[in-house]
Amino acid sequence: MEFSEHIKTANVEDVVLRRPFYQPTKGTLCVTGHHLIFSNRGGDSARPFLLLLRNIDAIEKRPSVSSGTITLKCKDLCVLQLDIPGMEECLNIASSIESLSSLETVSEMYPFFYRPPFLSLQDQWGLSSTEQHYAQMKEIHDGWRVSQVNRDYSVSPSYPPAVIVPHSIDDETLVKAARFRQGGRFPVLCYYHRETGTVIMRSSQPLSGANRKRCREDELLLQAVIDGSELGYIIDTRSSQQAQQARMTGGGFESKSCYRGWKRLHRQLEKGKVLQESLIKLVEACGDQSHSVDRWLSKLENSKWLSHVQTALSTAGLVAECVERDGHSVLVHGSEGTDTSLLVSSLAQLILDPDSRTLAGFLGLLEREWVQAGHPFQQRCAHSAYSHVRLRHEAPVFVLLLDCVWQLARQFPLAMGFSEPLLLRLAKEVYASDYGTFLCNSDQERCVTGVKERTHCLFQSLLRANERQHYSNPLYERTELAIWPSIQPPSLQLWKGLFLQWTDDALHLVEAQKVIQNLVSQCHRPLNEKVENTDG
Amino acid sequence: MALHVYFCVSPCIVFVHHVRSEQVRMLDRFSNKSTSGTLHLTATHLIFVESNAAVTTILHHHIASVEKLSLTTNGCPLVIQCRNFRVVHFVVQKERDCHDIYSSLLRLLRPVSYEELYAFSYNPKQNDQQREEGWQLIDLGAEFERMGVPCDQWQLTDVNRDYKICDTYPRDLYVPITASKPIIVGSSKFRSKGRFPVLTYFYQEKKAAVCRCSQPLSGFSARCLEDESMLQAISKANHNSRFVYVMDTRPKLNAMANRAAGKGYENEDNYSNIRFQFVGIENIHVMRSSLQKLLEVVGSRSLSASDYLLGLESSGWLRHVKAVVDAAICLTKAVTVEGASVLVHCSDGWDRTAQVCSLGALLMDPYYRTIKGFMVLIEKDWISFGHKFADRCDQLDGDPKEVSPVFTQFLDCVWQLTEQFPQAFEFSEWLLLQIHEHVHSCQYGNLLANNQRQREELQLKDRTHSLWAFLLSEQQNYVNPAYCPGHAETHPVLEPSTFHIFVLLFLTSLNLYLDIVSHMKPTICPQETVPSRLFNEVLDTICPSLLSTINRCLINGTVPSCFKHEAVQPLFKNSDLDLTVLSNFNCHSYQTFLRK
């Protein structure tokens, strides 16, 4: 196999591994195609330590005459250190890790080789399809239909084959409307609000350009959405200035005169490089233990991460507000419609929809709004906060989503069916995973590379009985009401569980969480039984 | 509306003075929403009854300031700031009514004698025997016995039996056996306010002592042989270490400035076997203005996350909290690791000294991390050693320069520790919040007045009730569900990291707590129905500890939801919306939820 070309030294004895929460241990280090394996030489009951090479974000080596030190900074924010005897071995190991961890070919990645005994490739990949999702929502069958217009990915390469659109719009119109939207991402339904009968839709920016082009079909499509009602809102996740500027490069926005009944609101959400740099600064601040409180607060402020959380939550709140309080439909888009639009639409759904707050419902939401909707995971999560590589398309939009969800769950401890460990697991898996779920940039790519046939699905695995237990919130009590988050700065907190998880304090907190979890589940058991009985 | 002044007697609260004011509106702090109702003023409370019968009650002692703002079209605004950081905003329709309420409040707010305080009229329907038993629940003599004192090196002295040596110390004091009466008397004359070195905590395992005192009256060159022998005696009482640490908790500059006034700090050349060091905790005036700034930041509406963090930083509050915890860690290390005795002092030895000694003991001794132990700790280091609660907490109308949140800061430090070691503490945040409430409520006798002597003169034990008895009677409410008694065995001494102190903030939770109190309206809050249902079911089954878990949930979760619920309500009024669309959105910050 090609991997062996990269491995110059496969085994080194007497390596000392230093990692958070553990005493330094001496053992054997082994490099394989996808993993670093460290086994304790004593051969005691401790399982060997396994590190996915894909998880390594940055590698720093300090060779000296007789030995060398390699510092591995991982995408899950953990920092490890290996003391390797022998300079040559040290350099060999380092270069193997460097080249293996940056392999870009999807079909060579570990998910294609991961074959756990408890999963079978015959299992269904993914939780649900657009058609199944549509079939479950009986109440929209009058006004909406499933369109297969993208079945060969020709209309929009980043959309799934099937999307939900207004009944009155035929496929021909869709094709034309798609040409007027960047990446062919014409407006599609993502959420239907039963109480008010209004919807949340998302798309990419219209390609109106400098000379204010129009597209009759696109206008018709949006007109069909608010048919009957007099008003709809377009939430543009760029500032109005940015939207104006986008016209110079062929993009643009919906002008008031062409889209009657639609009101446009601008809320600037950062993405791309700004967001990535924010994460880098935040992680740097969290790793800085230099004990000066004031400087730390400045650094935290300077990272602007909490501002991004605040803006994301408040924009999602605005969308939910339009739908729930005002009873108007909303279209969300930014420029490409693959980042901030998804962030806002999925957060708004969590605020509004009790079904999306269950464990399965949340994973279903992620699958629909992120995996199927074409968030370019491979590009966005190629590197995390430690990497020195020049930034290309990296942006922690998904991590920001998880942080916002964590803030929601913290403010509404009873409303979410899932727990913090799930969010932490997802934050880790999105960067480096045994599963194929977050591979590739779109549904099309996943089909081409055979992800759905040759890898396992993370979401399916998380819903297995024993995992489900671990990731459920023992305090969960379903509420049908919308949960309106507080965006007052004191209500927003740094997500310690993620950003400070490798510091000493984390241990105490994890222990305590376990205790609480046990306590609550003990108390809850009779309660759950009671509830089940009454249900039956 | 009319102004009624009449007398009536209710089972619990005596109404002496009663002002009713209909057509008053209470504004929500985080939105433009208001509720109308009736405002009642009694001798002890301000009560606002909303039209839907929801009641807001504020104890007069909790009111820090009342401000009458200039007249608006809606009426006359009245802003009430509370010592527990609650801010209530009323609008009274007629200006004359507003003025009446304002002036009545001003009269009621400033009690000039202790007898006017709520504790003397508060009657929880207990007979005298129950009251007496309540006062006996915490016994400091027994506490010193628990520490292993008196022992072969430390003894109880009766020099201060009649408060003759030091009127701000308790009657019972523990000193080294080698410290004779002349040494004590001499030493006390050389110490500010006569507060000579005495034992406050004894670390039995290493026979190391934590002692406290006030600054020496050394000036630039004065010395006192008795004081030197006193420190020598403390040193000799501990065979583990050849020297005593002397921790001056002030910044060096402040201590040096004190020399000009004939006070100062120990000169290492004069005292044999001491190791002197400054810790650098700022004084009460710095802490007062720091908290003031912090409250401004936390209280301001529609703040961006960045402004909030910058405001937090510039208030310096967390830096001060860290300084106090750092000092306690330093003390703990000296005692538990080196086995050395430590003498702690500041200027008068009742503010920073109390903070550092009590936090240090909390780190060293798991007993103080239990509910009862924590009360003992406060009773010992704060109440009996004369932290001036009356002055610092502004219980009587007095010098505003004497007011300072030293005790609040101590509670904040403890809270930081409970967050860092969730399993180590038997009590939850709720106990800290309750204690903080009652330092200002003046409802119980324990935390009244400035020192033990004053308390005895006021006969507080005969005329008021004990807070500890009340808190212990409902202690199941304060149990921390994550508490593991076994934690004390594996971690007898806590080693906190002060790196993460800033991540958390005591005041945040204080604020939230207050909002709970003011927003307990099931109709508004979407989450409210859920916990209450859960509550009932669980109470049936078992486990009082879950109760506090849910309390915590309430603190953390429910409350923001309800005030947010209101905050977003006026969002899409047409007027607002048109503005947003027509003009450049950047200029708008009219709603918290719509920022940026």
Image (tube, grey):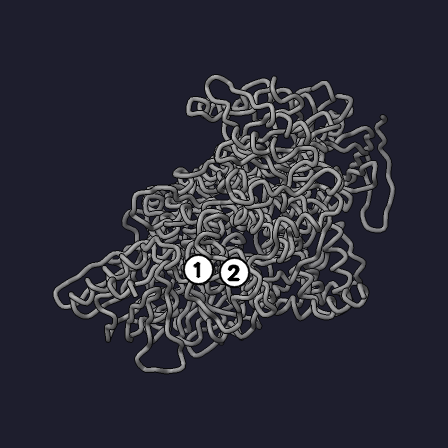
Left or right, B409 with respect to B6, comes to left
Q: Is residue B457 visible?
A: no
**Residue on which the image places disc 2:** A458
Where residue B588 is drawn, which disc sits there? none
Q: Amino acid at mark 2?
A: Leu
Asked which secondary structure carries label 2, the reply is: helix
Q: Position of residue B515 (x, y in %)?
A: 66, 44
Q: Position of residue A502 (x, y in %)?
A: 41, 60
**Residue on which the image places disc 1:** A433
Q: Residue at x 78, y 54 (%)?
A: B123
Q: Residue at x 52, y 28 (%)?
A: A180
The residue closer to the viewer here, A13 or A168, is: A168
**Tag 1 and tag 2, C-beta contact below 8 Å:** yes
Q: Is residue B87 visible?
A: yes
The residue closer to the viewer here, B522 or A37, is: A37
Quadrant, the N terminus of chain B: top right
> How far apart are the alpha carbons under marks 1 and 2?
9 Å
Left or right, B225 with respect to B349, comes to left
Q: Position of residue A98 (x, y in %)?
A: 27, 57
